[in-house]
Every structure is written in C-alpha cells, then in structure tokens.
Amino acid sequence: MFIILTSKFNSLTRRHLEWIFRTTTTKTRAVLSAFSIALLLSISAISTTRFDADIFQLFPTHQPALKLLLDSLQWTGSANEAYFLLEGEKDLLPREAERFAERLRTAQVDGKPAFRRITWRIFDESEAASFNSFIAYAVTHPQLFIGPEDVPSLVKRFAPDSVNDSLRRIQTDLAGQFGGAMTGLSSADPLYLRDLILPRLKAGSQALDLDPASPYFLSRDGKVLIMIAVPARPVQDMTFARALVATINQARLGSTVSISCAGAHISAVLDEAAMKSNIIACILSSLAVVLALFYAVYRRILPTLLLPLIIAVGVALALGVAGAILPSIHIISFAFMALIIGLGTDYSIHLYDRFHTERAAGENSADALRLAVVDTGHSLFTAAATTAVPFFALMVSDVRALYELGLLVGLGVLFSLYTTFFFLPPLLVYMERRFPANYRSIPGLGLRHVWRLAGRFPRAVLVISLVAIICMTAASTRTFFDGELKNLQPRHSEAFLAQGKIERHLNLAPKQLLVAVEGKDLSEVLRRASHVDELAGSWQKKGSISSWSSLEQIINNRDRQIEIIRNISSRTGGGLPLAELKSALLSQGFESGPFQPFIAAVTAGSALKPVPEEEVIARLKASPLRGVADRHLVKDAQGYHALLFLYYKETGFDRNAFLHELTSIDPTARVTNVDLVSEQLAASVKQSFLYGFLIGGLLVLFLLLSHFESFSGIFFAMFPVVAGSLAMLGIMALCGMGLNFMNAMVLVTIIGMGSDYGLHIRHRIRADDPQGREERFIQAGRAVLLSALTTIAGFGSLALADYPALASIGWATNFGVGFTALFALVTLPAVIVLLIKRSTLK
Amino acid sequence: MILMKRAHVFFILLLALLLNGSPCHARTISPIEGLEALRRGFAGISDFTADITQEKRLSLMKRTMVMNGSLRFKKPDLFFMEINPPFSGRMLLRDNIIEQASGKDKPSSRIALSPEQGLKQWFSKLATPVTSLPDGVALQADLTNSVYTLTITPPGKGQVKDISIVFLADGTVRRLVINEQNGDRATMTLKKLRRNIGLTEKDFRLE
C-alpha cells in the first residue's frame, strides 16, 4: 500500500516536471506573463506590509511573565517614554540639559509639539501650588502616610515644646527667604508634620538610584544625568518615530556633553535601521559572492545574471503571499529571507550543472534540458520539499518568530524552486539559439580526488568520520542555551548601549522582580497586596532581598489606618490636641486665620477616620507625587493592578521558594522579571521545536522514502544532517557559543537543507560502472559543494553582522552547512564504496 | 514659577547692592535709563559684603518681623545671606542652585532653578549696555531729589507682584522692597557695604 502510494507520488512528480519542461520550452510568453502578474500582485501586497522591529513582538504575549512585563511597560508609561542620558563634566550637565530640554520642548513633528512632557529636575517650580495642596491634605490625614512606629513622633509634635519650636522654625524659614514662598506651606503645615510623611513618599517614588543631594535626576556617581520625555504619539506610529529621532538628532547637535537615547521610539527606529543595514549589507555582499562563484565555475554570463532575478522573484512572491496572510512581518523574520539567496542559487546550480554536464557529454540541447528538468528536477523537487516542510511545520508554533520564519522560508523555498524551473529552461533555450557555445567539461573542484581517496581508503575515511562525530557529540553535551534576550540586541545600537548605562549608573539593584496583585475591588486588591508586602518584608528581614517598594509602603490600607488611629487616640485620649498650637500662635504673634484650614480639619477629626483608598490615590495623582501612585497602582478596563517591586542581588534570592510562598498567600498574583520571561520563552521555543521536529521529520521521512523507495535512501539523506548537526553543536560548544532563540532555528534549516546534499549524491550515483559513478559523483558533488558555499555566502555572512541575533544565526549556519557538506562529500562516498564492495563480494 | 520670580528678585537685589556711587541730578528718567544706571554701578564690582536689616510684613504674622544679618556676593555666580538670631538661617545661591539651612541640626534643602534663571546667565546679559526691557517686564523709574526708585513688575501672575529699588543719586542703595500678590511685603535696608575685598569660595559655604 505504501509502495503504491510512493510510486503514485513519484509518478505524479515526474508528470508534473514533464509538464514544466514542455510549458517552459514551448510557451515562454505565457510563463513570463503569468509570473509578471503574480509579481505585480506580490509587490502590491509587500507595499502594504508593516515591518516590526520590537524584539518582544517575536514572542508569544500570552506567556504569563512576558504578558505582565508588557502590561507593566504599558501601565507605567515606560513603553512610551524616551530616555536621554547626558554624560560629561558634572558642572556642565545641568546647563546642557536645560539647553537640550528647551530644544526638545520646541521640537515639532508635522507642525505639532514632538513631546508631551519633559522631566529632568526633582522639583518643578510650576507645581508648587499643587504640592502645597497635597501637603495640606497629607498632614491633616497622617493616618494614611505615617508608619505605626511614627505615631509617638506625631503626637509629640502637638506637645507644647514642639509646637513652640515649630512656630519658631516657621519664623526662621520666613525670615531667611526672599518673598513669601514658604507662606503657603507653613500655613498648611505649621507643625512640620511633612517631615514624617515626605521621606516615605520619596522613598516609594524612587524608581532610579539618584543622588539625593542633587536637585536633578543625577546618578550617585555624578556621571549621568537622565531626562525623561513623553513623545506626543505612541511607538506604533513608525513614521512619527522616525521623524522624532531626526528631531532628537537635530536637538543634540553641538552639545558639549554626550547625549544618548533609549526608549521604545528610539529603539524601534535605530534598531530597525541597524537591522536593515545589516541585512541589506549581508544580502548585497552575499549576492556578489554567489554570482562570482557561479560565474567562476560555469563561465556563462546569462545564467549568472539570471540568478539575482530568480532570487528576487522568489523572495518577492514569498513576501507577497506572507504579507497577504500576516498583518505585519518582523524584521528578523525577514532576515531569514537571506537564506533564499543561498537556496535559490542552489536550484539553479543543480539544474544548470546537469544541463551543462550533459551538453559537454554530447547530449543535444533538448535532451540535456529534459534530463536537467525532469531527472535532476526530481531530486530538486524532493530536496525543496524536504527543506520547505520542516519550515512549514514550524507554523504550529505560538512563537511568532518561528511561525513567521516557517512561513517565509517555506514559501521562499518553493517559489525559488518554481522560479528556477520556469525561468532557467527558457533562458537556456534562448541561449542555445542566440549564443550557441561549445560546452567544455566543468572543473571538478577537487572532487575527483575526494572520490578516489574515498574509494582507496573507505574504512579509514569512515573511521575518521566516526571518531570526529563521536568527539563532536561529546563536545555537544556542553551545549548551553543562552536565554538572555539582552544578548540578542544590537551590540552597537545606541538605544541598547544607553539602556546598559541606565542599568549601570541608575538601577536600584542588579535584579528586580515585579509582583502584580489584581482585582475589581480596590480595597480587596490592596488588602491582598498588603499580604504580599508582609512577605516581602519577611524576605528583606532575612536578607534575601535588598529592598522593595509598594503602595503599601507609601499609603496605609484601612486596617493599618485603624491601627494608627487607635494608637493616636490611646496616646492623646481622643483627637490630636490643638490647644497648644492655638495658644502658641497667639503668643508668638501669628495670625490665626491662615492656619484655620489645618486647625479646622484636625478639630473635625480628619486624622481619626479611616480614609477610602480611592480618595488618597486621587489626591496623590493630582499632586506632583503622582508618580508614586502611577508606579504602584494602575486601573484599566480589567480592574486594579497593585504592583510591588522587589530588588535583589544576583545571589541570595531563591526565586522559586519566593514564588512558592507567594502562591500560597495569593494564588492569583502574577510575577515577572527578565529571567522568568527568558525561561518561559525558552520552554515555549523548545516545545515548538519538538512539535515542529516531529511533524516536519515525519513528512521529510515520507518524502525521502517516496523519492528513493528504500530505507537506505533515507540513511544517505539523513546521515550528513545528523552528523553535521552534532558537529555544529560540538564546535559551538568548544567556541563558547550557546544556542539562543534565534540560532536554534538554524537547526531546522540544517535539517531541511542538509538532507538535500545526501539526497543529490545518492540520487545521481546509481550507475553500475565505476567510471560513471565517479563522473556522476563529481557532477552532483560539485553542485552540492557550490550550494554549500553559496549558502554560507548568503546566510553565513550574517556572522559578520553587528546584531548578535543575526550573527549567531550566521555562525551556526556556517558550522552546520559546512560540516553537513563535508560529511556528504567525504563520508558518503566512502559508505557508497563500502556498500558496493560488500554487494560485489556477495 | 514662584522660584523663578525669586530668581528675578535675587537679580534685582544684586544689581541694587552693587551700585557704584556716581552722582546724579534730579530729573525724570526712562525705565531703560534706570536699568542702565544699575548696570553701570555693577561694572566695577567683583565681590562685596554688607550688613542688612530686613523688615517683613507677612500675612501669617500680626507684627512686622525685623531681622538683621549680612550678605556676600562674588562674581560671577555666588550669593550668600545669613540671618542672625533669633531667626538664624543661611541661604546660598550658587548660580541656579538654592541651598538653605535654618539651623545646625536641620538638614539643608536644595532646589534647582532653571539655568536660564541662574546668576551667570543674568550677569552675562549685563555685559553690554541696557537698550531694551526684558520681555514681559514692566518697569517704572523715578528720580526725585537725587533718589532713584525703580519699580519692576515681573511678567505673569506669579507670587511676586513688584520689586522696588530705592537708591541715592550717589549710588548708595537705601532700600529694596518686595511686594507679593498676597499682600506680603519685605523691605531690606543695607549698611556698611564693602566692595572688592577679595572674597573666596570659603566665604560661601552653608556649613
């Protein structure tokens, strides 16, 4: 049954190839017209396709850790902020910052301000009134802001001596200043209760490790001043983002300090530009090398010139179809289209090599072309299918990077094959008519020696190969997975380097963990968050974390408020005493009128009633301290999200134990940090590869089995791949290179492409006479060698890219393709010779 | 905004304090002439000290507060004021950074004004003769019986309503008056002004 199926499949393939041969040699105009229409449609689809550059968009956002990370970036506004780092002489930084800030303030994009807000000083004088207003509220509601341990200090402030001291201090403050800036603050808070409240609020609002003595956002080492700006439009508007970056570049011209930028807009534009330039440089250089190789071997100008057209049409058709299917394509996925340069050339090499070889052997033009299209075409058909199928199998993945890669390369492979099938034969027919040539033998590229060496010492070659495979397999056990997303970012990208500087100079701790407690009811959310807060406190006590920040540390929940109110009442025997204040105001010559709001509020018992959380959060959000609330509590359509930030060092924090305790306290709390994101992504990628490998592997086996109609054919196709993959992993481990989210995809590439090498060798070496076998090996081996070289030139050239994600792909390809070709061209002939000898002996 | 106005105040105060004693006669002068007189007075000064008496009539206080102290200035950007007990306090303006300390056990506070409001910036503007008024600033100048009175109204609706500088025709500053929107008023009188005495960085420390 299976044999019938494979025979049918082979028969259909041959009939299909016969049809291609007839059509391309007799209906050239129709073929060209059909391709032209398809090309126009593809270009139209490509022109409406959006290319993304955000690395996070490559991964599944339903992963809990990544989802929370992206959510938090959105909630806190960090996703839409731009960061400017000014580095230089400490004395120069403020002036240059002001100059730069002014330029940013006046910068416009499309006639509108480029930025909504620019912040770079701790205190903004324009917010003095709202600050005073908040202080007036806070000091009359101390139960919201002070810790239980501060109650004695609070009560003491109302004692006679303290009251008199405070009023004398007011007079001193008023005396020491020009104008009456202190008047509003003094009347709002005559007892300096803000001394108990502000340190806690300031600590809670601190997201960066800043110099406390500096009025600017200056790092403790005084080397970096950070400016935070909010662009007028979101990062998704790439046209705006590009114009914004141009505006920023204009604004920093002529500055005497170094100004670098980070943030989503900058990253998107600069990374996109860096990636594009890397990819374009790679494509152009590899195209030049590929064409040079092809021409150097075959010495025919028209087939050489046809290669870029075949590649371009194959890529355009694949992109067009993918663009019509997908709403956007990630730029990294697009980088994999460089692979098509290598593959598209492979099909032309095999087809032309066969045609040329047959013509040189004396076949007429039509027969040579038929053999090339139908016979070599059959192995090309199977090879392309075995390459495309593992890639298409990756589409089962929920990882966008893998899904897009699978679709694009799969389509690219098929379109390249068919473009070769439909473009090369008409060109060869045209060449035969217009430029008839004497076909001379093509150089063997040393493959004759390889064949004879393998024929003479087959066992030695096999043993050396096996020893090499065993050694590399042993080395491959040291392969590690580098899940650090940072290591995939462009090494010289300004946004990446600036982000690194922020981490070095301004981060509160090397590591951070974000816990989100969520729900519809604010009180309930804050109550649950307070339990997490207690957990964080206990972990800090035992030294496992350096510090943490939460809303609970800044404002007291209802239970804590009641505790403080009880404490105040028990110490004062009722409300906070105001008699001393009233008396001291009189005795020290103060007007009582300006202090009435404070006196009236305290008299009314404002400090003795629990305050709803909504009220205090609204007050905070209306004050210059809004950042405290924004950072720790978010409300959106899903409800409230209380955020707790835990800071810890590289060692000493057992994350799993913490998560275990957290789950027992609040099973619905969500957690994220960079390590968790990497781990979950790695798990997702591994699962995708497993499914892709199983599905793709089964289909490839079916294709190979149907092609060869024997299991030995599968061995010939798969042996170089398996050996090449092990050698690739082994050499990468020896060179200290790990697998990552990007180069892991090369394994699929190697499985898809590598099986082609053995397939072509086995497909051609079927003749019984030794001389025929040698010539066929040289013909097929030359095509395989050239294919490997063009693949390395096309895809392996990414190794020189500045973008580590691309460079890691390039190195993996170079190692993988190189070793696979080596095992196909050196070890397989030895195996074939041994098999022939054995069958001869029998 | 309040602090910006305070920066204006510092500036005007400094100009007034630095006046050189060139004689003048009773006549009506334009605002620009008044400012130019201040500028000329500043030209030959590198530093100075003076004793002060300040009277503050504040909405918070029933009585006018009276305090004594001293001032120091050094070009281009250092200004220091110390108030004597019972209202002990010190204030240092280093270009655009204001530092204040009200007692030995109290922490000092620091506030950054915009560098555009810093002393350096203001004095750099005085390198050339005054030919126009600053944007948005209203100014009245009066010269009566050899006494100049310049009244400056800053732009906007900030806390400072206007500032008046009163000086004699020989350039001696008599008084500086700051009126605020809420009715508060501060009057500073200077005595024993000594110029170009070679002040150093050490004379401008809060501690």
Image (cartoon, coloured by chain):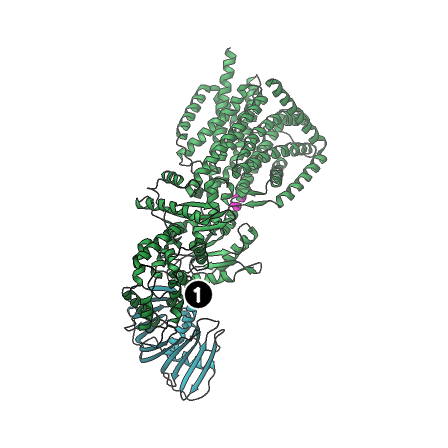
Extent of the magenta region: A275-280
The answer to which image quadrant residue A314 occupies is top right
**Number of marks drawn:** 1
Q: Nearer the viewer, residue A304 or A553?
A: A553
Q: Which chain is cyan?
A: B
Of the 4 image quadrants, the one containing the N terminus of chain A is: top right
> Mark 1: which secondary structure?
helix
- Relative to A780, say whether A104 is above or below: below
In the image, residue A36 lies at what x, y percent? 68, 39
Image colour for chain A is green
Answer left or right for A365 relative to A620.
right
Find out whether residue A278 is within the magenta segment: yes
Which secondary structure class fits the magenta region best?
A: helix
The answer to which image quadrant residue A468 occupies is top left
Query: Mark 1: which amino acid?
Result: Ala
Q: What residue did someone put label 1 on?
A: A129
- Relative to A322, say whether B50 is above or below: below
Q: Which residue shows up at 39% across the image and 32% down it?
A: A478
In the image, residue A704 lies at what x, y percent? 56, 24
